[in-house]
Amino acid sequence: MAQTLVASGGARAVAPHGDVVMRIDRLSKRYGQRLAVDGLSLDVRRGEIFGFLGPNGAGKTTTIRMSLGLIAPTAGGVHILGHDVATDGAHVLPRVGALVEQPALYGYMSGRDNLRAVASVLGGVPESRLDAVLELVGLRGRGADRVRTYSLGMKQRLGVAMALLQDPDLLVLDEPANGLDPAGIVEMRDLLRQLVAQGKTIFLSSHVLTEVRQLCTRVAIINLGKLVTESTVDDLLRGHGEFAVTVEQAAQALALVRAQPWGSTARLDGPGAIVTRAPDGRGRDLNLFLVQAGYAPDAIAPHAQDLEHVFLALTGAANGTN
Ligand SMILES: Nc1ncnc2c1ncn2[C@@H]1O[C@H](COP(=O)(O)OP(=O)(O)O)[C@@H](O)[C@H]1O
Ligand SMILES: [Mg+2]
């Protein structure tokens, strides 16, 4: 690692450092007694999809609002492409596309007219650009239809289309997959992959790790306004890898697994299923162990982790809970 972009404490440079597109620097926001964001520092680099994860109330939206200059920080700041958003937002915010929570849409208007309305607020955008962004988000064929006939996924993608109107360098998306059904999540994921392939940088928040694990290169987890960890998704999941095992006589198998040094956190996951760590973290060793013990599994697969479990593991609170 020849990179020295991320300082591990002390003063952090304000100038655009190499490929850092957005730098969140010791950012805090206080609401009364509550620190909604508490000394948060992060660097988002050019061309990555950065996942910003945390449970509801963790401070994601507050951070994003400060990053977009919508509210003022209590302390610290956000620099985008080297400009301080709070003091120099007019310079740089036109290069940022944003979707914060639900997009504000007029149901009685067509998707295209909704886009046109936003475009006129931005000072006008060529009609060809409306076509281009509708095409990008997969709504070209539905652009003339009223938005109230759209699925939630289509509405979210229209929101992304709005964020893309000015062809921004950086997209900031606050829980774009929230409330979407699995098909909608897949469509959103495909869209974001396509945008990154075209050279965009994406900063994406979510409270569901599985939504971003296939998409993001790096993730930061926050809780109570503070950074819990920042790492690649691989590292995050590897450290806490668990397996879902489908097996007959699951209760007996569980008792045996829990008696092993690697199995102390094992638990039932519905009838006939166990979630457990594996010896040395290896699924095939788990399989071997179960077979030799007379509990041949019907299936073993990596357990899709939810954020809560990663959290509990990271904060050391996993023992003794579920
Ligand atoms: N305008 C506000 N006034 C007071 N408290 C707020 C306000 N906005 C957010 N909060 C509080 O700040 C914390 C973080 O909220 P938020 O940033 O919305 O979290 P997230 O987006 O991660 O769910 C929560 O405890 C929330 O209740
Ligand atoms: Mg939020």
Image (tube, helix red, strand yellow):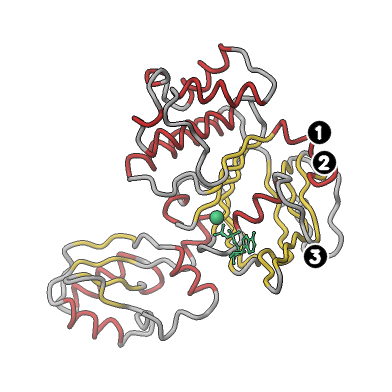
Name the outermost residue toward the front.
108
> Mark 3 belongs to which amino acid?
Gly
Q: Compare marks 2 and 1 and give the one earlier in the sequence.
A: 2
Secondary structure found at label 3 = loop
Label 1 crowd bin: few (<14), some (14–19), many (20+), radius 10 Å: few
Question: Of tags 2 and 1, which is closer to the observer?
Answer: 1
> Mark 1 belongs to which amino acid?
His
Q: Which residue is mark 2?
A: 83
Label 3 crowd bin: few (<14), some (14–19), many (20+), radius 10 Å: few
Q: CA distance from mark 2 to mark 1?
A: 7 Å
**Residue 199 badge:** none
Asked whether the residues under the numbered discs 3 and 2 touch, taking CB atoms below 8 Å apart as contact, a structural biologist would say no
Q: Is residue 196 left or right of residue 285?
A: right
Asked whether the residues under the numbered discs 3 and 1 touch, taking CB atoms below 8 Å apart as contact, a structural biologist would say no
Q: Is residue 307 above or below residue 143?
A: below
Quadrant housing residue 122? top right
Residue sitting at 40 percent across and 62 percent down? 305
**Residue 91 badge:** 1
Residue sitting at 30 percent across and 65 percent down? 284
- Relative to the observer, which residue lies in front, 57 or 281? 57
Task: Please provide percent x and percent y for residue 187.
Answer: 39, 36
Task: Please provide percent x and percent y for residue 52.
Answer: 58, 54
Residue sitting at 39 percent across and 38 percent down? 153
Q: Which residue is mark 3?
A: 9
> Mark 2 belongs to which amino acid?
His
